[in-house]
Image (spheres, grey):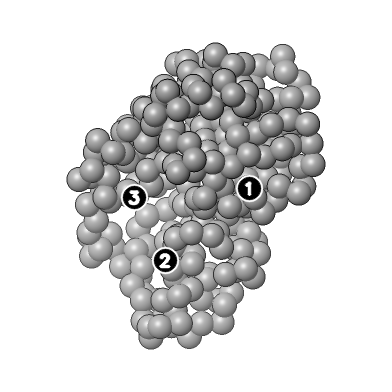
Amino acid sequence: MKNILITGGNGQLGHAIKKIAGEFPDFNLIYTDYDTLSITDAEAVNNYFSENTPDACINCAAYTAVDKAESDEDTAFVLNFQGPLNLAEACAAHNTSLIQISTDYVFNGNACVPYKESDDTDPQSVYGSSKMRGEAAVMGINENNIVVRTSWLYSEFGINFAKRMKELMQERPELNVVFDQAGTPTYAVDLAKVLLQILQHRFAQPDAAIGGVYHYSNEGVTSWYDFAVAIKELTGATTRVLPITSDKYPTPAKRPAYSVMNKEKIKATFGIEIPYWRESLAECLKFI
């Protein structure tokens, strides 16, 4: 039995891991959140690892308020950089495997082909910059650590685009949604399974050189507008969904215009199959 620490256990991805935990009976999953373990407190983190010595840690804790980060830069960097650094140092001291969750926002969004892990990062927001620094901290401490970048995360848990769209479609006759930002939605439950499969691989082949950065989202490409239209169709809503350009919906933080990620590396390394985004959306909507 392997003890797996899940930080940020009360967040969207933490809840998704809880949902599928029974599929991994060899893992004892231990969930903490800011009230039980603040990853920004280095002493608290070190004490926790000394007392519990987890075999692996999946860091789901993060500052994810993308727009608020523009005016709350210090907090964003404390949570998204200092926190992962504290965890990485504790993991290195206790021989604990670490998986850090990151984001498509580390890229500038100017590409026209899917981003590979080796492509240059160029974040255009405080949130993206803080997550990039977190990646560098984790990999700088131990090259065997793993960073998984994901995009457009949604689920039946927490606050996210899919849940909000379904709610609004029950309340409003018409919705405007941007159509000039392309990416790929990621069902948090699919990501949760992959993270635990990565740990299975690591424990089964402890000497395998699998450390590094990986990309994971569902398969396919869409826009926020088409994502909303799919939600409308799958739920039978009658709301009119209208496409608008990003300049008609200004936000404090700049969104990547294109954030599709190449996932060949994670598929080849871990032998996983990735569901098409619309199929996963249909599955998720059963629980919202």
Q: Position of residue 107 (x, y in %)?
A: 37, 36
C-alpha span from label 3 to label 1: 21 Å
Position of 28 relative to 217 (above/below): above
What residue is shown with label 2? 225
Disc 2: CA contacts within 10 A as few (<14), some (14-19) or many (>=20)? many
Quadrant of the image containing the C terminus = bottom right
The answer to whether any part of residue 32 appears in the image is yes
What residue is shown with label 1? 17
Are discs 1 and 2 less than 8 Å apart at CB?
Answer: no
Task: Indicate the amino acid at tag 2.
Answer: Tyr
What residue is shown with label 3? 65
Task: Indicate the amino acid at tag 1.
Answer: Ile
**Along the line of sight, the residue nearer the viewer: 202 or 216:** 202
**Along the line of sight, the residue nearer the viewer: 35 or 58:** 35
Horizontal relation, residue 88 to residue 285: left or right: left
Q: Position of residue 118 (x, y in %)?
A: 48, 25
The answer to whether any part of residue 213 appears in the image is no
Residue at x 42%, y 23% (from the top left corner): 43
